[in-house]
Amino acid sequence: MTGYLITVEGPDGSGKSTQARLLAEHLGAIYTREPGGTELGEKLRDMVLDPSSEGLSDRAEALMIAAARAQHVEEVVRPALEQEKNVVSDRFLESSVAYQGYGRGLGPEEILDMSIFATQGLKADLIVLIDVDAPLAANRRGENLDRIEKAGDDFHSRVMSAYRTMASDDPERWIVIDGSGTVDEVSRQVIDQVEVRLEKHAKD
């Protein structure tokens, strides 16, 4: 018996970070995030997102995020699951598939393989997608953007399309939530649907 790994995904500006925290608090689960979650991961996060890192290549970006993920799983996620603790992560390997695989055009299969290598085969038990249309997400991102947020409308449209495709292809693991409402409205949807899945998981 191990803990349950729930990840919260969505484009920048979707509100997924807030929803991940609220879900973790409600469940009494460990909250963590990617890239980050460890000392090394946070340093790599800063490098990847720093707007001044304009010369960073797409492949280097993907590898740095994979390295952060490997350390995150080794140091935080897997030990918690082995102690039968539930974990809620703000982003996991599906982010890499969406952002680097589709958004950067590096290939979803190649990025997925690299991510699976980083996690030693660990995948999320349940993925919550906070779905928002591009104009709303762009408005929420505002003007003070990090390096990836500055990638442009076409990039972010590819990312959202990728998320929707992945969710449609694997409905048993994905929950899609309309993220256009208020924080409280979206949170209620997330919690309600996650609890349904957790009850089903407990019965199985």
Image: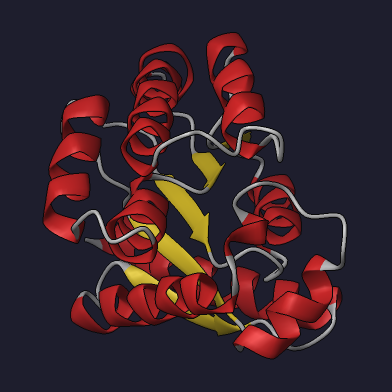
Q: Viewed as shown, does residue 94 lie left or right of 35?
A: left
Q: Please tell me which residue lies in front, 171 or 69.
A: 69
Residue that appears at 24% across and 73% down: 172
Q: Identify the image quadrant of residue 169.
A: bottom left
Q: Please tell me which residue lies in front, 61 or 117.
A: 61
| Residue 202 location (% of width, % of height) | 34, 56
Q: Viewed as shown, does residue 30 lie left or right of 98?
A: right
Total numbered labels:
0
The N terminus lies in quadrant:
top left
Please name the colour scheme applied to the rendered image. Answer: secondary structure
Residue that appears at 51% across and 61% down: 9
- The image shows residue 113, relative to residue 84, as above or below, that is below
Q: Please tell me which residue lies in front, 56 or 103.
A: 56
- The image shows residue 96, relative to residue 86, as above or below, that is below
Residue that appears at 41% across and 61% down: 127
- The image shows residue 96, relative to residue 188, as above or below, that is above
Residue that appears at 53% across and 43% down: 89
| Residue 114 location (% of width, % of height) | 19, 36
| Residue 150 location (% of width, % of height) | 66, 59
- The image shows residue 28, relative to residue 39, as above or below, that is below
Given the current orientation, which residue lies at the most extreme front position?
Answer: 55
| Residue 107 location (% of width, % of height) | 18, 58
Q: Viewed as shown, does residue 154 lie left or right of 49?
A: left
The C terminus lies in quadrant:
bottom left
Q: Identify the image quadrant of residue 178.
A: bottom right
